[in-house]
Image: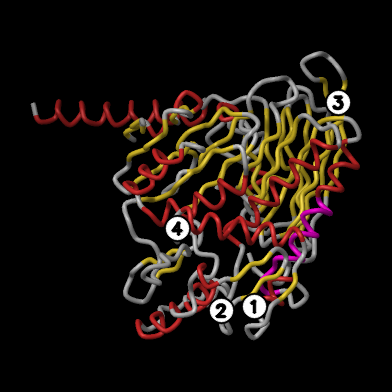
């Protein structure tokens, strides 16, 4: 009896984990992408119409090279120490931006639901 | 952001040019200029004929006004007034007009807008960023130098008492927004968005004829409380959530000072957003209604009704005047906030 309860709890935790991961990985997103450095948007691309290209983004003498290809975006080269941004691969989900912490850079899907002209502060 | 130093220098200037079509299918130019002035980040986007040149003259006009009104720039007219040792000073038409407006609004709001509060603001360190809590006796002393009714104005001639200081910060950006909107209109621009560090001034609708969608920032957290869908108006928010400091005893002090007590405003409000035709009205009222608190702010609206407002209270309520309620939609993540309509 006790075992069954434990197994039940384990299955529940497992399912919550799977559902959670699915929500994170398949979070809905549009095609607009922001490249942000220190909170300021450097570039905005609509990946559905942007031509293939590479961009060099500098921070304090260090650079990240960002590639846009076939409507996808990723960091291909970086001279930051950890290279996490490269290992994250193509930007795929609305909930998990590509981040290069050392170079204060992040690449994320823009929230199109709030397609605003300005914000009152 | 380091205030004061960069005010005159435009550290950033970007002009981009593109073409887009209005709702009749006519091609319109689009031009944007972004720069630093009046202690804030300013962005002007215009759509229309010769947008590129017009946006440049808008930037020049803002720089010109800033030079007149800076409290810290030794060459400004306000600096001359503040260092006049009680003598009469002759100022330009722009400055005289703005001072007259500030004094009118001070009277209308019973001193809740106080264009001579600067010495107290400075004692709290809000002008330098080196914040401190002044002694009560010091505040009392400084309040003797505060009082819009002590400012003498005769046309372009301004006189204040020795040790008094005039600061048009609470109305200057609003006035500048109006001036820019006027300048753009004279140049045939029918559609523009002017963002003066979060003070928004809208000329006409968007080029496609639809309303502008303007987010209203959550004073307490990330994201927006809701969205205003509006055209041809100005919108300004005041609150103590943008510039504040925490004292050693944990008390949080904001940058809007209650002119009666000399202490930062601490009432039932988190923020006040004013929507009206003129930016300067929005600017002056958002500050003074914030000082007043919910009850007096609503009474003020009922008395004048020449503006609309959105009050966000500390208890998580949104009070919105009936004239603007249909233009406001609550953000999905802020569904827990209670929205109440202020009626006549």
- Asked if the residue at tag 1 contacts the one at tag 2, i.e. Cβ–Cβ closer than 8 Å, the answer is yes
Q: Which residue is mark 3?
A: B28
Give whichever of discs 1 and 3 has the lower sequence position.
3
Q: Chain of mark 2?
A: B
Q: Which residue is mark 4?
A: B240
The residue shown at (47%, 33%) is: B226
Depth check, mark 4 against mark 1: the one in front is: 1
Give whichever of discs 2 and 4 has the lower sequence position.
2
Q: Which residue is mark 1?
A: B82
How far apart are labels 1 and 3 at the CA level?
Answer: 45 Å
Q: Chain of mark 4?
A: B
A12 horizontally vs B82: left or right = left
Q: Nearer the viewer, residue B51 or B277?
A: B277
Above or below B240: residue B139: below
Q: Chain of mark 3?
A: B
**Crowding near pointer 3: few (<14 within 10 Å), some, many (20+)?**
many
Whether discs 4 and 1 lie on one chain: the answer is yes
Depth check, mark 1 against mark 3: the one in front is: 1
Find residue B47 and report its horizontal and vertical position in percent: 81, 31
Whether discs 1 and 3 lie on one chain: the answer is yes
Quick one: which residue is furthest to the front in this view? Answer: B154
């Amino acid at each position: 009896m006790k075992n069954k309860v434990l197994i039940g709890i384990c299955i529940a935790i497992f399912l919550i984990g799977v559902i959670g991961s699915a929500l994170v990985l398949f979070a809905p997103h549009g095609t607009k992408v922001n490249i942000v450095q220190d909170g300021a948007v450097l570039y905005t691309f609509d990946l559905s119409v942007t031509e293939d290209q590479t961009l060099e983004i500098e921070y304090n003498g260090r650079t990240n090279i960002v590639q846009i290809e076939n409507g996808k975006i990723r960091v291909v080269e970086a001279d930051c120490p950890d290279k996490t941004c490269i290992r994250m691969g193509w930007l795929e989900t609305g909930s998990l931006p590509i981040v290069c912490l050392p170079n204060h850079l992040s690449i994320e899907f823009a929230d199109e639901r709030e397609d605003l002209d300005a914000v009152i502060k | 952001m380091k205030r004061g130093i960069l005010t005159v220098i435009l550290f950033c200037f970007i002009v981009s040019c593109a073409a887009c079509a209005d709702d009749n299918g006519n091609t319109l130019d689009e031009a944007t200029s972004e720069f630093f002035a009046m202690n804030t980040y300013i962005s002007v986007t215009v759509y229309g004929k010769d947008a590129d040149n017009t946006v440049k003259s808008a930037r020049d006009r803002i720089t010109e006004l800033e030079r007149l009104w800076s409290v810290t720039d030794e060459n400004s007219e306000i600096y001359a007034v503040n260092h006049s040792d009680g003598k009469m000073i002759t100022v330009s038409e722009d400055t005289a007009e703005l001072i007259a407006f500030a004094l009118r609004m001070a009277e209308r709001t019973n001193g809740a807008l106080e264009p001579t509060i600067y010495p107290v603001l400075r004692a709290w360190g809000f002008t330098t960023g080196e914040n401190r809590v002044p002694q009560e006796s010091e505040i009392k002393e400084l309040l003797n130098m505060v009082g819009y009714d002590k400012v003498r104005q005769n046309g372009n001639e301004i006189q204040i008492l020795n040790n008094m200081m005039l600061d048009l910060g609470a109305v200057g950006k609003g006035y500048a927004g109006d001036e820019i909107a006027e300048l753009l209109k004279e140049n045939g621009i029918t559609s523009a968005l002017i963002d003066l560090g979060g003070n928004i001034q809208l000329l006409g609708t968007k080029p496609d004829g639809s309303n502008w969608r303007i987010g209203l920032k959550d004073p307490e957290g990330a994201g927006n409380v809701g969205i205003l869908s509006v055209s041809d108006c100005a919108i300004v928010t005041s609150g103590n959530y943008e510039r504040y400091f925490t004292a050693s005893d944990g008390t949080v002090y904001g940058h809007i000072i209650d002119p009666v007590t000399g202490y930062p405003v601490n009432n039932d409000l988190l923020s006040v957003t004013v929507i009206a035709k003129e930016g300067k009205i929005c600017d002056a009222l958002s500050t003074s209604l914030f000082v007043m608190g919910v009850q007096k702010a609503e009474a003020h609206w009922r008395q004048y009704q020449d503006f609309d407002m959105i009050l966000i209270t500390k208890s998580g309520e949104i009070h919105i005047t009936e004239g603007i309620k249909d233009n406001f939609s609550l953000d999905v993540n802020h569904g827990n906030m209670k929205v109440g309509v202020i009626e006549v």
